[in-house]
């Protein structure tokens, strides 16, 4: 029916204004970047030396382990916290909106400000340590910034916000009558959760978990500002930026980026393999 | 059906439900106000009322989803307000069925039995019986999304009765079905109730359903119970204007009973002094201010010329053909409008002058509020 | 679990009139205990988490406006001196201006370049439409590092790096596809009959765009523009890679300062963080407002 308005092939030229810039600025660099990983700086000969260097030099291959060691435990904890909070406030709980809003709030501030906030709050003279010392839990300040823990906390704050922001809507889309039905049939709260609520939301939760994990594998400013980018929080992106901005070795930088991308893909594949083994579908009944 | 009846495995022990002075407030709005009801064991009680009048709220309180603001719910003499909803032994069919989408039909039905830790053999037997009873015999392994609306409704019913509930609650279970299926399911429901004898509370705003299914009907409006009675009582003797209007009485005349003549009251309208005879009843006497009402299908259009008692002259102003009958509005000389239903296709023309006859035996006196 | 359901305090001892063979109903004690435990621990967890979130934010603000704050609960006095100092020392105003220039220009260009595409996507069905939509999704689903590094290397070799043009151009990589997706629902909700009408009256295609389509989607464009703007304001990775000392956006500048922050007093750094927080908060409220407004328009 729309053909009445535009019948000529020429009209597809209207796609060009958006496609051309993307081809130039996105597709070409992407391909070039991939080719670059098989070249040495300043040469066009094809070589595997970047990858060999990456996987034989501890300076590089350590980043895989260091990134995952920081990000995977954080992501799992984030999932538990965010799920716990959003599950508790789901439905029409009074004050639920406020709690959800405050939980998601860090997302609007972004990583740089959260990093500063973690420093201000958890530094040795910050509120956290002074309170702990005052109530007698700690004897002396615990170093929670400029190391693994600083980055870990900042990741947690942002990750919980991200996961919660997604879970709130997903939980609302599960018909509350399903839980009520289970309860009236004699199920306890726990059994209702285990046999009705969780199977229905499981696939969505795993998807959000995977997205969040992938995002956090690319952690950079947090690792630099509140972490210790020289050792404990030397993540993929830290090394990639070091290669690009300090050594101007874009070939190596992109090799790091590619390894990171592959790691993300693997994570995604694992989570989705788990996800497939259960109910995947909609949990909202018609109203 | 017959086998199911013989096996007796669904016949639950009977429960009498009493509701005492039940009130539910949401903030400052009152959803249910001082409702009192008794449902004898084995009875089929219908809650009838317009949308938003508090029917679901009453069910929710019986079910335990909502806590009453005040008042008691009593099962066989035991107040159950403090009993957790998972312990009340109530079978519920939700308005949207609330079937578990990740389970098969059989798993859905078995859910309540799993919670009661029934052993495997017994569970299987009871699930199969329930599936047979609602005529879904070969569909036990289907998932819910692969069922039609009517089939889903039957799964919901089977899931609710397989646990042998003390009370069965149904919240507009037929409202999502088409007219034909609705009728069919209605007869099935009725049969089922006759076989099982479970105390049943049924919510609907469809008066036809209420009439055909129930042994007792409760009419509600704005959270207040208006009348409780058998279907016959409700439809034959509505107690007030709201009930009469809701169940289809269409024409209302305000006035006073001024006289008695051979076992008939003489009624006179307040403004234009129209006089009508109406059958005498015990509740009213001369001098009462009352409302007279008559159903549109009870008003007759007569042809003989003389104008006597209870007949009025008027012109047809609206005509609306609705299949088996035609609805008219007739305006009388005094400016009153009467609603009339006449069988058949459009026998009278717009603007035609007709005579109406209001049979004294069919006119009904109801109290002014 | 819901607020309306009061916690049941104790096993109720009520006189029980037994029905025929019926056991009286009873609550499960274990269930109640578990439920109580679950609720308490959830509340503890939520309050702890929110205390940290709010405490962190407050700590930044107090530190930015505190005179001297070392080991005490609250600063000894309050001053705007740090804030003013930070603003001047780091030329926040200047970088703010640069950022606005870059982002505004890039927003306008993204909208202009994506509109024709959006129109075709909304009105026509063609074989590779799904594939095309998938392609437009790639720039914001792939990790930005994957294209940012080669773009930086290319820009440095052709001299576009560290220039305003370069910074504007790299914003289009996300800006164009983002505006495609954000505009699409608006154009899809337009009534195509208006266009037939216009064309049957002899409007040329350009006129059609200008006189019929554009006026109808102005509200949608405005809302989209605000969202695209916010999205670009937060662009980080690629800007960091190609920015020069005088050509960088506010967040990249703040990051660079914080990265090598050894010698600066914390109050100064927190003031700087605050200068970034204010526009971000402003924009997120703006976007909330816009999305509630547009949802009404699209009837969702
Ligand atoms: N959770 C709630 N909060 C506030 N008001 C409510 C709530 N639930 C119901 N109400 C109000 O209480 C009144 C009764 O609602 P209820 O759901 O019982 O109506 P109903 O008779 O079942 O109507 P319907 O036939 O449409 O299902 C309505 O006015 C409704 O708006
Ligand atoms: Mg209802």
Image (cartoon, coloured by chain):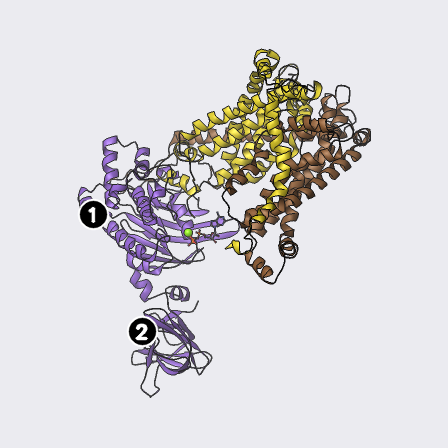
Q: Residues within 10 Å of mark 1 (few under 14, many from 20)?
A: some
* Residue toward you, C158 or B211: C158
Q: Left or right? Give the position of B141 relative to C185.
A: left
Front-lying residue, A158 or B234: A158
Residue that numbered label 1 is attached to: B1
Please determine whether, in this image, residue C78 is positioned above or below residue A53. Answer: below
Classify 10 Å Cα crowding around label 2: few (below 14), some (14-19), many (20 and above): few
In the figure, the shade used to draw chain A is yellow
Q: Secondary structure at mark 1?
A: loop
Up-down relation of residue C167 to residue C288 (above or below): above
Colour brown maps to chain: C
Q: Which chain is purple?
A: B
Mark 2, residue position: B344
Image vertical order of residue A46 relative to residue A177, above or below:
above
Q: Residue at x 62, y 47 (%)?
A: C115
Residue B208 spot, x, y in % from top left? 32, 60
**Chain letter for the residue marked with disc 2 in the picture:** B
Nearer the observer, B184 or C237: C237
Q: Residue at (31%, 33%) from the top-left corner?
A: B114
Could you tell whether C260 is left or right of A105 in the image? right
Question: In the image, residue C174 lies at what x, y percent?
Answer: 63, 36
Q: Is residue C53 visible?
A: yes
Q: Is residue C167 left or right of residue B190?
A: right
Q: Which corner quadrant of the image does residue C48 belong to? A: top right
Q: Chain of mark 1?
A: B
Q: Identify the image quadrant of residue A22.
A: top right
The nearer-to-camera label among 2 and 1 is: 2
Q: Is residue C295 visible?
A: no
């Amino acid at each position: 029916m729309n053909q009445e308005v535009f019948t000529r092939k020429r009209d597809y030229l209207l796609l060009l204004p958006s496609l051309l810039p993307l081809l130039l600025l996105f597709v070409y660099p992407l391909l070039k970047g991939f080719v670059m990983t098989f070249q040495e700086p300043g040469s066009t000969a094809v070589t595997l030396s970047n990858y060999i260097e990456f996987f034989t030099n501890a300076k590089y291959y350590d980043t895989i382990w260091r990134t995952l060691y920081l990000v995977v435990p954080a992501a799992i904890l984030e999932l538990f916290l965010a799920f716990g909070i959003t599950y508790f406030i789901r439905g029409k709980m009074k004050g639920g909106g406020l709690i959800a809003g405050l939980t998601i709030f860090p997302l609007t501030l972004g990583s740089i400000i959260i990093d500063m906030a973690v420093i201000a709050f958890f530094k040795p003279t910050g509120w956290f340590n002074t309170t702990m010392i005052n109530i007698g839990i700690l004897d002396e300040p615990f170093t929670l910034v400029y190391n693994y823990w600083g980055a870990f906390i900042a990741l947690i704050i942002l990750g919980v916000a991200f996961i919660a922001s997604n879970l709130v809507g997903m939980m609302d889309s599960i018909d509350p009558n399903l839980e009520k039905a289970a309860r009236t049939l004699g199920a306890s709260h726990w059994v209702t959760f285990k046999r009705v609520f969780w199977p229905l939301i499981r696939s969505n939760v795993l998807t959000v978990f995977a997205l969040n994990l992938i995002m956090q594998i690319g952690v950079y400013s947090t690792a630099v500002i509140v972490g210790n980018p020289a050792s404990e929080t030397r993540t993929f992106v830290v090394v990639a930026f070091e290669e690009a901005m300090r050594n101007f070795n874009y070939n190596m930088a992109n090799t790091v980026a590619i390894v990171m991308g592959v790691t993300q893909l693997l994570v995604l594949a694992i989570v989705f393999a788990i996800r497939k083994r259960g109910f995947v579908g909609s949990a909202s009944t018609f109203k | 059906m017959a086998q199911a009846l013989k096996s007796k495995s669904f016949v639950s022990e009977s429960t009498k439900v009493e509701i005492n002075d039940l009130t539910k407030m949401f903030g400052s709005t009152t959803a249910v106000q001082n409702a009192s009801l008794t449902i004898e064991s084995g009875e089929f009680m219908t809650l009838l009322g317009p949308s938003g009048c508090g029917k679901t709220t009453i069910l929710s309180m019986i079910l335990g989803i909502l806590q009453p603001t005040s008042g008691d719910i009593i099962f066989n003499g035991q107040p159950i307000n403090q009993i957790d909803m998972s312990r009340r032994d109530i079978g519920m069919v939700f308005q949207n069925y609330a079937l578990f989408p990740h389970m098969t039909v059989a798993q859905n039905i078995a859910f309540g039995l799993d919670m009661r830790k029934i052993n495997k053999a017994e569970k299987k037997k009871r699930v199969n019986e329930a599936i047979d009873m609602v005529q879904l015999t070969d569909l036990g392994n289907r998932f819910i999304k692969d069922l039609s609306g009517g089939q889903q409704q039957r799964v919901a019913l089977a899931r609710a009765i397989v646990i042998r509930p003390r009370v069965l609650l149904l919240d507009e279970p037929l409202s999502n079905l088409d007219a034909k299926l609705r009728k069919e399911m209605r007869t099935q429901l009725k049969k089922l109730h006759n076989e099982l004898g479970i105390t049943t509370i049924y919510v609907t705003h469809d008066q036809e359903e209420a009439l055909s299914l129930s042994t007792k009907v409760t009419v509600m409006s704005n959270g207040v119970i208006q009348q409780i009675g058998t279907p016959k009582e409700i439809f034959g003797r509505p107690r007030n204007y709201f009930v009469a209007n809701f169940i289809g009485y269409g024409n209302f005349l305000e006035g006073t009973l001024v006289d008695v003549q051979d076992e008939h009251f003489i009624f006179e309208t307040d403004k234009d002094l129209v006089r009508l005879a109406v059958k005498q009843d015990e509740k009213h006497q001369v001098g009462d201010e009352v409302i007279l009402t008559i159903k549109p299908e009870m008003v007759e259009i007569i042809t003989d010329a003389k104008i006597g008692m209870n007949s009025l002259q008027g012109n047809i102003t609206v005509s609306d053909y609705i299949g088996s009958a035609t609805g008219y509005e007739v305006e009388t000389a005094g400016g009153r409008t009467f609603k009339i239903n006449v069988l058949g296709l459009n026998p009278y023309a717009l603007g035609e002058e007709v005579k109406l006859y209001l049979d004294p035996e069919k006119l009904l006196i109801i109290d002014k509020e | 679990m819901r607020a309306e359901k009061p916690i049941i305090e104790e096993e109720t001892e009520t006189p029980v009139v037994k029905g025929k063979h019926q056991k009286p109903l009873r609550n499960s004690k274990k269930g109640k205990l578990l439920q109580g435990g679950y609720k308490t621990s959830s509340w503890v967890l939520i309050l702890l988490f929110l205390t940290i979130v709010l405490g962190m934010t407050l700590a930044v603000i107090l530190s930015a406006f505190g005179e001297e704050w070392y080991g005490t609960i609250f600063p000894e006095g309050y001053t705007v001196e740090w804030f003013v100092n930070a603003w001047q020392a780091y030329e926040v105003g200047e970088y703010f201006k640069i950022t606005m220039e870059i982002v505004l220009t890039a927003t306008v260009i993204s909208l202009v370049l994506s509109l024709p595409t959006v129109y075709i996507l909304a009105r026509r069905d063609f074989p590779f439409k799904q594939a095309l939509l998938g392609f437009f999704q790639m720039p914001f689903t792939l990790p930005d590092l994957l294209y940012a590094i080669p773009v930086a290397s290319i820009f440095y070799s052709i001299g576009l790096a560290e220039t305003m043009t370069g910074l504007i151009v790299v914003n289009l990589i996300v800006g164009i596809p983002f505006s495609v997706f954000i505009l699409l629902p608006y154009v899809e909700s337009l009534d195509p009959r208006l266009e037939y009408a216009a064309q049957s009256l002899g409007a040329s295609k350009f006129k059609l765009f200008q006189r019929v389509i554009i006026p109808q989607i102005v509200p949608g464009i405005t809302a989209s523009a605000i969202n695209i703007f916010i999205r670009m304001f937060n662009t980080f990775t690629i800007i960091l890679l190609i920015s020069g000392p005088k050509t960088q956006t506010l967040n990249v500048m703040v990051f660079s300062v914080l990265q090598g922050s050894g010698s600066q007093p914390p109050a100064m750094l927190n003031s700087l963080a605050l200068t970034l927080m204010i526009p971000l908060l402003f924009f997120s409220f703006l976007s909330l407002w816009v999305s509630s407004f547009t949802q009404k328009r699209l009837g969702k």
